[in-house]
Amino acid sequence: MSLLETNEFIIQKKILSAHEHYDFQDLQGNPLGAADGNLLQIPPKFQVTDTHGQELMHMHGKTLSIRHDFTLYTPDGTTLGTIKKKVATLGHQEYWVEKDGQEFMRIYGDFTNHEYQMEIANQTVVAVHRKWVSLRDQMGVSITGNVDHRVVMGTAIIIEHIELTEKQSSSGSGSFNIRL
């Protein structure tokens, strides 16, 4: 089964690397694809490929923005959506995805404890559960509704990237993040 067809998969991330790399696997551990990006690239960019190296999608961040904005694209450059992080919230974080200026997905949850869900029209369509493992971060993804799998993959990677870069910039670990 391909990454664009399976409704349950695992995303594994390397923990210590200036180069962000994610592996997608089915629940039995069989490879489905990979994603690559670079922590120091400005603007940040990621590419998701299948097991044959064919591009499934790519993502580009904005260099200068009030909030984190990443646009998700098909291989031919068609926009799948733009994920944004809410700037000001009371005690919680929130993301949303919009297309053509209209919001179509909200992402809620406890990002500190790595539990969140994606909702379309107030219906949960995706649940993400992240576990810490010895050598890699691991996130289980379960798609329960009608949603483009590329939007799900891109959203999970971008949330991980934003949370990582914010954590690094708040701890002063040498990584930087341009937001004006």
Image (cartoon, rainbow, N blue to C red):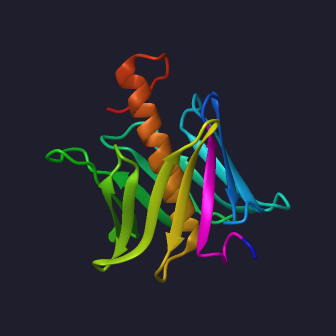
Name which quarter of the figure residue 118 lies in: bottom left
The spot of residue 130 in percent (x, y) is 48, 51
Q: Is residue 8 magenta?
A: yes
Name which quarter of the figure residue 49 lies in: bottom right
Q: The N terminus lies in which quarter of the figure?
A: bottom right
Q: Residue at x 54, y 54 (%)?
A: 139
Q: Residue at x 40, y 70 (%)?
A: 100
In magenta, the rendered stretch is: 3-14
The spot of residue 135 in percent (x, y) is 64, 36
Using residue 93 as the reference point, say whether residue 6 is left or right of it: right
Q: Is residue 95 visible?
A: yes
Which residue is more in the foreground, 172 or 14? 14
Find the residue positioned furthest to the bottom. Answer: 146
Q: Residue at x 50, y 55 (%)?
A: 156
The spot of residue 30 in percent (x, y) is 77, 62
Q: Is residue 97 visible?
A: no
- Identify whether 30 is placed above or below 134: below
Which residue is more in the foreground, 172 or 83? 172
Find the residue positioned furthest to the left. Answer: 90
Q: Is residue 107 magenta?
A: no
Which residue is more in the foreground, 165 or 140? 140
The spot of residue 89 in percent (x, y) is 18, 47
Q: The C terminus lies in which quarter of the figure?
A: top left
Q: Residue at x 24, y 44 (%)?
A: 87
- Identify whether 42 is placed above or below 108: above
- Identify whether 66 is placed above or below 9: above
Which residue is more in the foreground, 11 or 97? 11
Q: How many numbered marks does the figure carry?
A: 0
